[in-house]
Image (cartoon, rainbow, N blue to C red):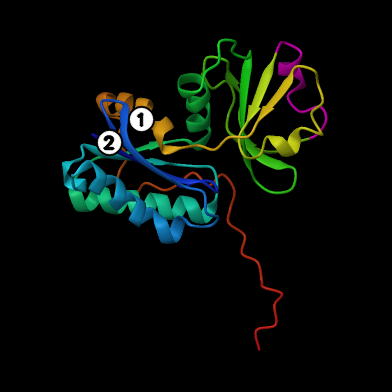
Amino acid sequence: MILCIETSTAVLSVALARDGAVVCERVCTRPRSQAALTAPLVKEVLDAAGITAGACDAVCVSAGPGSYTGLRVGVSTAKGLAFGAGIPLLSMGTLDILVEGICHSERSEESPAFIVPMIDARRMEVYTAVYSGEGTRLTEVEARVIGPDAFAEYLEQGEVLFVGDGALKCREVITHPNARFKEAFPLARHMARRAQQDFEAGKFEDVAYFEPFYLKDFIATVSKKNLW
């Protein structure tokens, strides 16, 4: 029994999986709700299943990249549950979760040659990497500014599915006929299969020292509002 927590984008979700299959989930699309609603959604899922965190075998959290605040909330919650309940901590990359949703949860009969998940990083920048149509990551995760020639070498080889909350904004820039775009969000339910595999393989994180994969440093801004 693994509790999965996904807080890296605008959509917050929590799911409980048994042997890799989801038995209960909650999804919240309210903007910037991670800080206020992650813990309540965890409680709702556990209550719906009639168990406590101590009855889980592990907790799995999205590791990033993504929203700085969202990642901090998700990882802090997962580490607190793992420490308090004495259960192992697992993690899964946000881009991996997006691709998992395409390849194993929402797969169509015709798969693309490549899948390029995109997490919005503002303006024309995205967090991204290239995956095969079967879901194997082929490149390193990077923060990339998207221009007209982005991913040209893959588009020349066949259909490329750009997926994620950063995909649609690139549609007017990447105009190659082999480009296909789909808005999607990483969800906790898409973590279940891989979390089960990682649990069986013993791929646990160090609860004390695990940190999110931010990819870029957080930059604080000064409010322009006149507060006095």
Residue 66 occupies which quadrant of the picture?
A: top right
| Above or below, comparing residue 152 to residue 89 in the picture | above
Q: Residue at x 45, y 54 (%)?
A: 72
Residue span colored magenta: 147-158
Where residue 10 sits: x, y (%)? Answer: 55, 49
The residue tagged 1 is 192
- In the picture provided, is 170 more to the left or to the right than 42? right
Residue under label 2:
2
Give the class, few, some or many, for how many residues have Cα within 10 Å of label 1's Cα (few <14, many ≥20): many
What count of labels does the image hold?
2
Which quadrant of the rendered structure holds the C terminus? Answer: bottom right
Residue drawn at the location 30% of the way across and 43% of the way down = 206
CA gap, disc 2 to disc 1? Answer: 8 Å
Residue 26 among magenta residues? no
Prevalent SS, magenta region = loop
The reply to whether residue 15 is in sight is no
Residue at image location 42% in from the left, 61% down from the top: 36
What's the residue type where badge 1 is placed? Ala
> What's the residue type where badge 2 is placed?
Ile
First in sequence: mark 2 or mark 1?
2
Q: Are marks 2 and 1 in contact (CB under 8 Å)?
A: yes
Residue 18 pos. (x, y %): 25, 30
Bin the neighbour count of mark 2 within 10 Å (Cα to Cα): few under 14, some 14-19, many 20 and up.
many
